[in-house]
Amino acid sequence: MQTLQSVPGPVLLVGAGKMGGALLEGWLSRGLPPALVAVRDPSTSVELAKLLASKRIARDPQPPLLPNHAAVVIAVKPQEAAHVISEVSRFVGPETVVISVMAGRPITFLARHLPRNAAIVRAMPNTPASVGRGITVAVPNTKVKPQHRDLAHALLSATGPVEWIKNEKLMDAVTAVSGSGPAYVFLLAESLARAGVAAGLPKPLADKLARETVSGAGELLRRSDLDPSKLRENVTSKGGTTEAALKILMSKSGFDPALKKAVAAAAKRSRELAK
C-alpha cells in the first residue's frame, strides 16, 4: 500500500479552499514531503499563504515540457470546473492520476476536459475532513491502475477513512448521506437546543448541553462495535423518559420517515446537478 512518505512524484492541488486546505494539512501532517507539493489557487487565504510560505510549497507552477505529476487533485467549486480542468490538463501525464473532490461532476464530465485515457478518481469527502474526522467515498474509471488507486487512497485517507465503490451511480446517495449528512447532525443540535429552551433551560446551557450531547454520542458511536440500534436501546429504560421521547421520534410521522425523505431529496438534487 502506498504511503505519503513514498509518493512517486509531485502532487498538484488545484483549489485550496476549505476541502483542499484540509487535504493539504492532512498530507503534510502524515509525512508528504512539502517539496513534492504544489498549489494552484487564485484566491489563497492569508492563513494558507502563510502555510505555503513556511513550508516552502510551490505556488502556481508552470507545466513541465514532459508532465510527471503523480497526482492532480481538483478541489475547486463545480461551477469553475470546466475552465480549471482544461487549464490543469497540461499537468496530466501518462502515469498521472486525477482525483476530483468536486460535488456533482461525474467522471464523463472530467474525461471530456482531460487528456485521452486519463486515470480519474471521483471522490466525495465531507466537511469533518477539516478536523481529520471525515469520510470519503471514491470511484475509479477504467483507466485507474492499482498504483493509481493506492496513491489516491493514501491522499484521500489523510482526512479520514476511504470507501471504494464500483458503481458511480451510487455517488448521488453517498452525497445525500455523508456529503450532506453533517448538516443534518448540526440541525439536530440546533433543534435539541431549541427544544431545551422551550422546556425552560437558559439558552447558553441548552446550547452547550445539545452540542456536548451530540458530539459525545457521536464519539461513543465511533468507538463502539455495537449497532446504533443497540446503543439506542442501552439508553432506553422501560417506562422511562427516553422511551417517552422515542415514541414521538419513532412514530410514523417522526424522525425516520422525515430523514428518508430528506436523503431522497438530496440524492435527487445531486442527479440534477450532474446533468
Image (cartoon, rainbow, N blue to C red):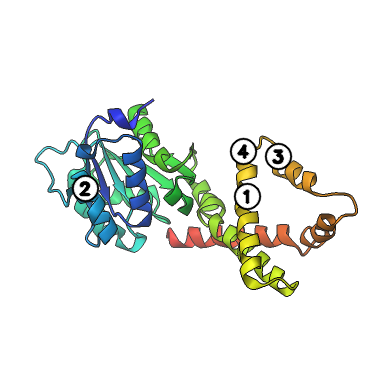
Tell me which label, 1 or 4, sits earlier in the chain. 1
The answer to whether residue 120 shows anywhere in this view is no
Tell me which label, 2 or 1, sits earlier in the chain. 2
Q: Residues within 10 Å of mark 4 (few under 14, many from 20)?
A: few
- Name the secondary structure under disc 2: helix
Q: Residues within 10 Å of mark 2 (few under 14, many from 20)?
A: few
Q: Residue at x 75, y 72 (%)?
A: 199
How far is mark 2 from mark 3, CA to CA?
45 Å
Residue linked to disc 4: 223
The answer to whether residue 225 shows anywhere in this view is yes
Task: From the top left corner, tell me how far across and down residue 96 is, in percent.
Answer: 25, 37
Tell me which label, 1 or 3, sits earlier in the chain. 1
Number of the label disc, if any, that sits on residue 95: none
In this picture, residue 191 sits left or right of residue 73: right
Check disc 4 and give the amino acid type: Arg
Q: Quadrant of the C terminus?
A: bottom left
Residue linked to disc 1: 216
How far is mark 3 from mark 4, CA to CA?
11 Å
- Name the secondary structure under disc 1: helix
How far is mark 2 from mark 1, CA to CA?
35 Å
